[in-house]
Every structure is written in C-alpha cells, then in structure tokens.
Image (cartoon, grey):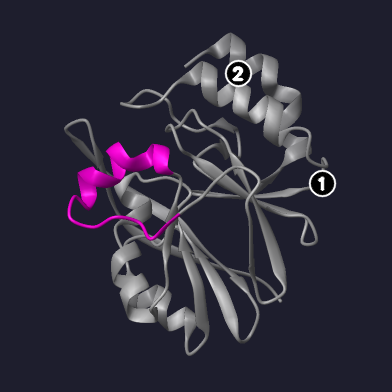
C-alpha cells in the first residue's frame, strides 16, 4: 500500500503558447488496485507501471492539457472512469471536445483504492476546478498545480486567479499537519510546514 511516482515529458499549451514540461504522475493503491492521478504524456509508460492491477479511476487534478492528454487512452485501456471537477469543463473541452469525463470530483468526496482513502479538496485558483487529494493515513497531499515547492501554481493565464489560489492554499491546505508531504504536479515534493511560513512573501510578491 502506498504511492508510486513517474515523471513523463511533453508539452503544455494554452492561450496560444506551448511549453516543454515534465509532469509528475502518481499511482496510489496496492498490488491489486490503484488510482492514477494526472495521466500525462505517455499512456504506455503509465500502463507499464500499473501492470495487471485494476484501475479504480483516472483522477485529474485539473484539465490543463499536460495533465489530461492521456486520460482517455488510459481510461479506455483499463476500463476506468475519468474523474474531474465540473468547473474544469471549459479547459477540458479545449483538449477533448468530443469526450466528457465519466464522473465528478467534489469537495469532501472520498475516493479509495487498495486500502488508501483520498479526500478531495477543491482548491480553485490555478483553474476553477483545481482539486487536491489528501491521504491522511499516508500523510500525503497530491496538490496538482495548486501548491509547489516554493509557492502557489501559476495564475497568469486564462481561467486563473492569484487571489483565489492564495485563499485556497491558506484556508484549505495550510490547516493540514505541518509534516504532510506535498506531492506536486511538477518538480520536487515539499511539506506543508515548509511552505506555510512564506504566505506573506507570496502576497507581497503578487501574481
């Protein structure tokens, strides 16, 4: 029972620009069933890591294309539902206009796979329906692009808001235990207690 980590590489496109990115893909569960968090860039690499285990769901923390570009392929391969907060529809439709997610992520919802329970925390700001997943018994938060090692996720593009993301982090993530490990959508992990002292710096720095 635990957490597996893959790094996949590709591009992120929005507002007329395209950037090279490395994404963290998280597989949570045990030897028989798992949840996949953010199916990015390489369905084959993710499928290889899953092996013959049952995929309970392909969970999307948000719908920027670098986080969802392999969600349908993986969901179809493993006969698993795609879960996404419905507020992400405008972004999802940019990548998958002819496919809709199979289910919704809602604040407070609990998902489970392989004995691990994950509580959904709606954290808008990076995008309207951005969601984090908190596994209390593991002491782990999967933060998507909401909170990184060094501060909040980017808010300079369409459907994002700096004031909203800071409020989400302050009100919903910083109350978690300081030693909670934050597994991010890109880059290195961090801990709640390593980021919370810097709130005022972020506010001073602004967007």
Which mark is on residue 83? none
Magenta extent: 86-103
Q: In this view, does 92 lie above or below 163?
A: below
**Real-space CA distance between mark 2 and mark 1, rounded to the nearest whole angstrom:** 21 Å
Residue 202 tag number: 2
Q: Is residue 28 above or below residue 146?
A: below
Between 146 and 17, the one lying in front of the other is 146
Whole-percent x, y for residue 200 in the image: 68, 14
Residue at 65 percent across and 16 percent down: it is 201
Q: Report crowding for label 1: few under 14, some 14 to 19, many 20 or more residues within 10 A (C-alpha).
A: few
Tell me the SS state at disc 2.
helix
Q: Position of residue 61 (x, y in %)?
A: 48, 49
From the image, tell me which residue sits under label 1.
Answer: 179
Residue 62, horizontal then vertical, whole percent? 43, 45
Query: In this rendering, would 189 be left or right of 89?
Result: right
> Does 82 sit left or right of 150 as displayed?
left
Is residue 98 or residue 114 the one in the foreground? 98
Q: In which quarter of the image is residue 112?
A: bottom right
Query: Is 94 contained in the magenta span?
Result: yes
Residue name at image x 38 percent, y 75 percent: 45
């Amino acid at each position: 029972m635990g957490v597996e980590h893959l790094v996949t590489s590709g591009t992120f496109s929005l507002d007329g620009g395209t950037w090279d990115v490395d994404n963290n893909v998280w597989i949570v569960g045990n030897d028989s069933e798992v949840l996949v968090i953010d199916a990015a860039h390489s369905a084959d690499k993710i499928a290889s890591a899953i092996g013959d285990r049952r995929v309970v769901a392909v969970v999307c923390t948000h719908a920027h294309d670098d986080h969802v570009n392999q969600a349908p392929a993986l969901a179809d391969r493993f006969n698993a539902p795609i879960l996404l907060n419905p507020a992400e529809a405008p972004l999802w439709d940019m990548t998958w206009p002819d496919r809709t997610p199979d289910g919704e992520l809602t604040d407070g919802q609990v998902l489970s796979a392989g004995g691990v329970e994950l509580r959904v925390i709606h954290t808008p700001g990076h995008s309207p329906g951005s969601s984090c997943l908190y596994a209390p018994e593991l002491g782990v938060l999967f933060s998507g692009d909401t909170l990184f090692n060094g501060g909040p996720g980017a808010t300079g593009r369409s459907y994002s808001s700096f004031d909203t993301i800071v409020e989400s982090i302050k009100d919903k993530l910083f109350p978690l235990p300081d030693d909670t490990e934050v597994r991010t959508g890109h880059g290195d992990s961090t801990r709640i207690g390593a980021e919370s002292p810097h709130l005022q710096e972020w506010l001073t720095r602004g967007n």
